[in-house]
Amino acid sequence: MSFPELLQIIALIVFVVAAIGWSYKKTDLIAVGLALWVLSTFINDLGHLSLSIILLILAFVAFVLAAIGWKYKKIGLIAVGLALWMAALVVPNFIH
């Protein structure tokens, strides 16, 4: 079992725990699961930075900030992280 697979299993467990209503202090468990999941997607590719990897790192940071409860006005950090993640998937198709 590789490290990214282990991170995905932990993310699944965190999602299940969040789904059944458990919580830990003020931590947003959905954001924790998303942070683990996005980390598992780019952890092996850190050797070569590309636009996609940079966007995934920014998505990871947004999810971590959302997980610890950091807020900036009315901006939803989970939505920001998801937008960055989708941009990491879509933008490289347009830039060659």
Image: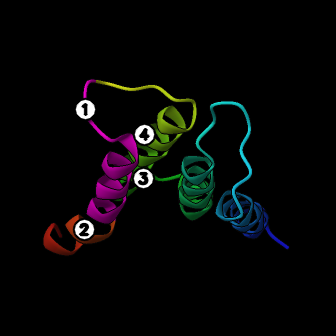
Residue beneath disc 2:
92
Proximity of marks 2 and 4: CB atoms separated by less than 8 Å = no
- Describe residue 51's horizontal placement relative to residue 57 as left or right: left
Q: Where is residue 74 in the image (x, y as percent from the top left)?
A: 25, 32
How far apart are the alpha carbons under marks 2 and 1? 29 Å
Over which residues does the magenta segment extend?
73-88
How far apart are the alpha carbons under marks 4 and 1? 14 Å
Residue beneath disc 3:
56
Q: Position of residue 61 (x, y in %)?
A: 47, 37
Density class for disc 3 (Cα within 10 Å; few <14, some 14-19, many ≥20) is: many
Proximity of marks 4 and 3: CB atoms separated by less than 8 Å = no
Density class for disc 1 (Cα within 10 Å; few <14, some 14-19, many ≥20) is: few
Magenta-colored stretch includes residue 65: no
Q: Which of marks 2 and 3 is nearer the N terminus?
A: 3
- Tally the marks: 4
Label 2 sits on a secondary structure element that is helix
Residue beneath disc 1:
74
